[in-house]
Image: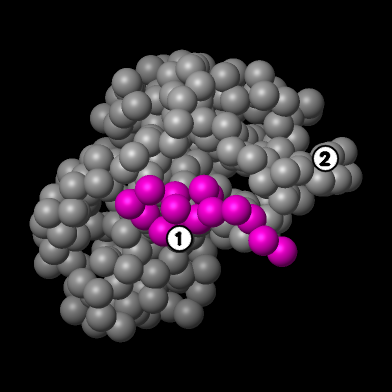
Amino acid sequence: MKIALVDSGIGLLAAAAAVRRLRVDADLVLSSDPEGMPWGPRGADDVTGRALECARAAVAHRPDALIVACNTATVHALPALRAAFEPAVPVVGTVPAIKPAAAAGGSLAIWATPATTGSAYQRGLIAEFGNGAHITEVPCPGLADAVQYGDTAAVAAAVAAAAALTPAGARAIVLGCTHYELVADRIAAAVPGAVLYGSADAVAAQALRRAGSAARATGGGRIEVVLNGRSAPLPAAALAYAEGASLVTPATA
């Protein structure tokens, strides 16, 4: 089985590691756009064009399913990606885990990029899946960039700033950007007692379901990295995170 993932940067590592946990034999194609990162501030057409380029580079490796491991790209580009590649390659988007986080009610916060915070898209998800919970939208300027470049001091500063905006006693935090899942331990430490909700596990499981019986029965656990359409090694910053390091450790049953 081969699963491809696209994102602006290393935010795709969380979903890639989740796929590997579920299928240690799965081959992975990681296609990203470091030259255009971040996608959040870009317009819809620009994001769609860049996501399509990343996806074309990934699909050239003949995956059994394609994960759009980016909230921004899912918002703007998912219809175009599905039109371009389905039904031959199932395309799975990434949506913030508002529904499961809100299921128990109470107070929760959604940490997201400034472009996503307050957007019609996120407000629509809150209206549809908020379940009456008290929800605070928390912008996290600079956090995705800090994660992307492995800047631990900048990560700490951005997490502290977002924690200061999070209501005391918040029961849960929804991680509304895939990059944030890579520093979930630091976010949890900054907001003690809050349960964190990411999307990686659900997205990985859905991609494996969509790949279905048409997928190759086995793989070798290989990784192919594509940066702006060119084969490359895994970026050094990726290895600073447990998810990235896990992908270069020989898979064991």
Residue 118 to residue 106: above or below: above
Q: Give the range drawn in magenta.
A: 239-253
Looking at the rendered structure, the secondary structure element under dot 2 is: loop
Three-letter amino acid code of the residue under disc 2:
Ala
Residue 45 located left or right of residue 226? left
At 34% from the left and 27% from the top, the residue drawn is 34
Q: Is residue 120 magenta?
A: no
- Image spot of residue 229 (x, y percent): 49, 17
Q: Mark 1 points at which residue?
A: 198
At 32% from the left and 77% from the top, the residue drawn is 194
Front tag of 1 and 2: 2
Three-letter amino acid code of the residue under disc 1:
Gly
- Image spot of residue 122 (x, y percent): 38, 48
- Image spot of residue 102 (x, y percent): 45, 70
Contact (CB < 8 A) between labels 1 and 2? no
At 32% from the left and 22% from the top, the residue drawn is 36
